[in-house]
Amino acid sequence: MGTAIPSIACLGVIGRNNNPLHITIFPTHSHDGSQIPVRSPLQFSLILSSTLDIFSLRARHFAATNVGLTTGDYGLLHAIDERLAAYGFETNTGVKFVVVVDMRGRRADSTPSAGGGEVVGGGGRERKGTGGGVGNAAAAAAAAVGLREGEMKPVFKAMQTAYIKLLQNPFFDPDEHSPPTGTGGKKITSKKFADDMRRIGESWMPGITSL
């Protein structure tokens, strides 16, 4: 069995009312060589929900200490177990992006491919990942002992770009998904947005600077 390197196991988008907007789950490498999600959709949904308290605590800490969070990048939210870790980003409108990384999710001798993430709550399928200019995966494996600070920045930037494109769609009403009343909201069902999330998750690997 080859060396395992980190890969994205799940991408989640949470509305300003703390309502789930989108989740995409990706298959990861298992010890027998198969490619299956490391957790069930329900388990990933619970993981995303568990990050909400951390977002809230961090925001209160920044407010209490007068430390400005100018970028919205919360970095590592928490290590879920010895294999999974959750990272977070919050936009200035209160929408939260969560990336769950599987520290042993991809074989070092493999390259990002269009294996297909499972979109829960909307979207279509079948879009090829481009790899985002990925170099030699085995070389990246040698440097990937954990994740360096800033490794998620390209992911969050790409997710934010995809979300901005979604907002620019005249047929998308953000108030339907995060109502001003402060409760509830519909999930995102845009196929284009789902394809973008899948491309991002499949293309990322340690060391990538652009997606």
Image (tube, rainbow, N blue to C red):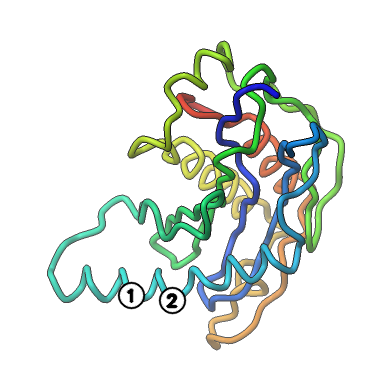
**Disc 2 crowd, CA 10 A, few/some/many (<14, 14-19, 20+):** few
Residues at discs 2 and 1 in contact (Cβ within 8 Å) = yes
| Image coords of residue 96 (percent x, y) | 49, 62
Residue drawn at the location 60% of the way across and 50% of the way down: 168
Label 2 SS: helix
| Image coords of residue 202 (percent x, y) | 68, 34
Amino acid type indicated by mark 2: Asp
What residue is disc 1 on?
A: 57
Instruction: Please state which of residues 85 and 99 is positioned toward the viewer in this rendering.
Output: 85
State the CA–CA distance, disc 2 to disc 1: 6 Å
Residue 198 location, quadrant: top right
Q: Is residue 209 visible?
A: no
Instruction: Please state which of residues 12 and 110 is positioned toward the viewer in this rendering.
Output: 110
The quarter of the image holding the C terminus is top right
Residue 63 location, quadrant: bottom left
What residue is disc 2 on?
A: 53
